[in-house]
Amino acid sequence: MKAPVRRSAIFAGVATLVVTLCGGTGIAQAGAGSVVSARDEDGELKLGYVLPETGQLAFLGPPQIESLKFAIKTMNDAGGVLGKPVPAVVSSDEAGQEAVAAQSAERVLAADVDAIIGAAASGMSLAFIDRVTGAGVVQCSGSNTAPTFTDYDDDGFYFRTAPSDVLQGPVLAGVVTGDGHERVAVIGRADDYGRGLVEATKSGLEEEGATVPVADTYDPKATNFDQVVQKVRDARPDAVVVIAFEEGVQILQALIEAGLGPDRIGVYGADGLRSEELASLVAPGNPERLAGMKGTAPSSGANEQYVKDLKEFAPDLKELQFAPQVFDCVTTIGLAAEKAGTDDPQKIADEMVGITKDGEKCNTFADCKKLIAAGRDIDYDGVSGPLEFSDAGEPNRATIEVYEYDDEGVLRTPVRTEVSTGE
């Protein structure tokens, strides 16, 4: 049972602005934090997204957006959902700004969608989750990892295919202590993502017997990070963990300048820093300066057939981070609609957990759809892993990958490990 944690993060004036811009769209205001939807059940599954086309996480946009479109193509190649092709997705930008993300969600809701994919950042999802779930629309994120969502009061409409940082933190801690480090500083963004992963990593480190002299957060909008870097330096750690997004480039540069680069101490990151371009951004012309840095992230390349097929669909795609998880969001929603026999979001939400466990195994939309048509219960194993949704609507099992930058600053992913909540 989820605890009643709920926050209204739609900023003053946003709702009024959207009603003005999108009047007559079937969305009527019913007071702050709630929406009354005039959505009609028409037998056609309509999807929208709020994902980063611009902003500090723009590098995560292409893999998620292209994977979403690929999932729709895959479903349509198998005859569509409910006997109809899934139409083109309604797109909108989260932009790395809460107010913009909230307005984007309103625009997508106004298009009368049945489900919204996104946002990428946990903080951006928290900016509009109350509006989406309050409207009785399904929301599924492939990259929200903040522990906040596990007990969030979403009325059963919010799901995620990315594992909670409660699962990732101990793996990250194990990588750090496995490399022999005993005194570890942990710093992260002062938001739900950063605070959650800092705490999970700190707990994991202490359980492994390490000392954590610094476990601090910083303002990600700061113009410089000298203060937090100085705090790390004063603690004299033999390793530092940085939980960051784009601002992590500045932090890593400051650590290197302070004599705390990966050539001196252990330097570790998480999914927010996993990027093919990180080394060249941190040290333009000298990417080898990041050699030896390691980190963890939900796995993006474990399913080789999916990776091959996605790259054929989107040959210019470079990053793959969270692409499999978004594919599974879309596929799970499509299969839930098939199981429910309707595009009614409430009935789709009611089927989301059940189709990921305790049924007959299947791992493609086409195969699972056939089993459903035959009246069978299914257990959809996704391209990101087995899913096995808990009652909270999130994976209780996941594959976490360990990445590292080699001697030339090239990103490698040599290790993957399976973790679970034990449920």
Image (cartoon, grey):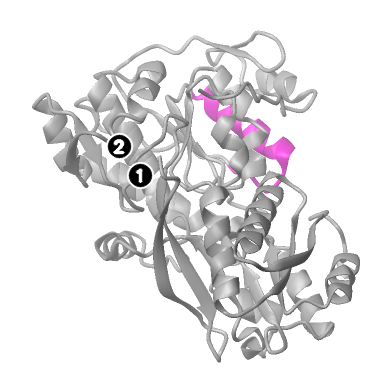
Out of 20 and 260, give the one closest to the viewer: 260
Residue bounds of the magenta highlight: 93-111
Q: Is label 1 in a helix, a strand or a loop?
A: loop
Residue at which label 2 appears? 356
Residue at the spot x=77%, y=76% of the render? 237
Say few, some or many: other residues with alpha carbon within 10 Å of mark 1 (under 14 / 14 to 19 / 20 or more): many
Given the image, on which type of amino acid does mark 2 rest?
Answer: Thr
Q: In this rendering, would 57 be left or right of 113? A: right
Q: Do the numbered discs 1 and 2 sit on residues whose CB atoms are within 8 Å?
A: yes
| Predominant SS along the magenta part | helix
Q: x%, y% of residue 152?
A: 59, 29
Say few, some or many: other residues with alpha carbon within 10 Å of mark 2 (under 14 / 14 to 19 / 20 or more): many
Residue 346 in sight: yes
Which image quarter: residue 278? bottom right
Residue 324 higher or lower than 274, as above or below: above
CA distance for labels 1 and 2: 6 Å
Given the image, on which type of amino acid does mark 1 rest?
Answer: Leu
Residue at which label 1 appears? 387
